[in-house]
Amino acid sequence: MDDLDRRLINRLQRGLPLVRHPWQALAAELDSSSTQLLERLRQMLADGILTRFGPLFDIERLGGAFTLAALAVPEERFEQVAEQLHALPEVAHNYRREHAWNMWFVLACSTEQAIAETLHHIETLTGLPLLNLPKEETYHVGVYFPV
Amino acid sequence: MSVYISRSEDTLAQHLIKLTQAGLPLVDDPWAWLAEQLHMSVEATLDLLKRLQAEGAVRRIAAVPNHYRLGYRHNGMTVWDVRDADMPRLGALIGAQPFVSHCYRRPRQTAWRYNLFAMVHGRSSDEINHYREHLRQLLGDACVADEMLVSSRILKKTGLRLPQAPR
């Protein structure tokens, strides 16, 4: 990664300008050419430094229902419960976190009703107490990793 | 959030999601490519993107870095018990910190006292501890308790997909 790669990564995390010729606009900004920028981008995607380039949708605004939930899983059952959750298509993300509530996951369903049913199913499946923490207000979403 | 996109716009957005799920093609004129796929003019396509972005359905057209590869290996979910009356002001303040990637208000529960969540990322555990301390100072007396839940393992990560329409 050289200086141009770094500037391109930082700039592209903030988004492509919605102008008629975005790559030319970015090339002028970064003192490069559109051909060179596209080549660098292609290379960084191939290398896995970037995982994706494209529109980032606020999927929640386009329908569906979501929640963040947590389980307090006894250590000896942790792997088993992780597998049970992994098998459920409604579980989008699942992370271990160092806390008494040690398993944190996001559910994505088509309706609120389906969320309630899935939560009930997980409680029954695991026999563990469950925290349901749907978001009530969004103050900020926007990952930015400067390099 | 109170802005909703119209039905026909919603259909176009769904089409756009399918077209760009794997990413936007790396071509010199990406809007012309999209316009052709959507059977629309380039101008109408660009207008659609601008509207979707203004309404928030598209956050931006951007690169997503592999944050592990960039050295951001530490993440902490900081959780705060904040006086309800102070939430609108403090939620916005915490969310505006450049090192906070996600910030939400969530309900308290019998077994869970925290109502403000802020995700922080860093290149060392010192760095995220420092961010937590900074947030604590911003919240001041309005916050009576807090914790930071550090992620130690990804158990599943499929990303949010557009759910199937209700049956």
Image (spheres, coloured by chain):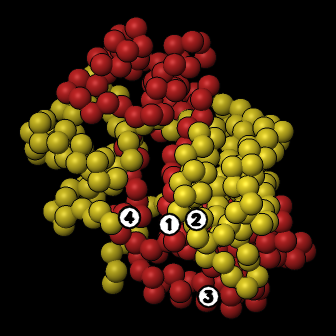
Chain colours: A red, B yellow
Which residue is located at x 30 percent, y 47 percent?
B53
Provide the residue designation for mark 1: A137
Q: Which label is found at residue A121?
A: 3
Considering only vertical position in the picture, is B50 above or below B18? above
- Number of residues whose C-alpha sits closer than 10 Å to that of mark 1, classed few (under 14), some (14–19) or many (20 or more): some
The C terminus of chain B lies in which quarter of the figure?
A: bottom left
Q: Secondary structure at mark 1?
A: strand
Give the spatial CA distance, label 4 vs label 1. 8 Å
Q: Residues within 10 Å of mark 3 (few under 14, many from 20)?
A: few
Circle 4 — which element?
loop
CB under 8 Å between discs 4 and 3: no
Task: Read off the residue under disc 2.
Answer: B87
* Amino acid carrying mark 1 in the image: Glu
Q: Nearer the viewer, mark 3 or mark 2?
A: 2
Task: Identify which residue is drawn at 69% across, 43% down.
Answer: B121
Q: CA distance from mark 4 to mark 3?
A: 30 Å
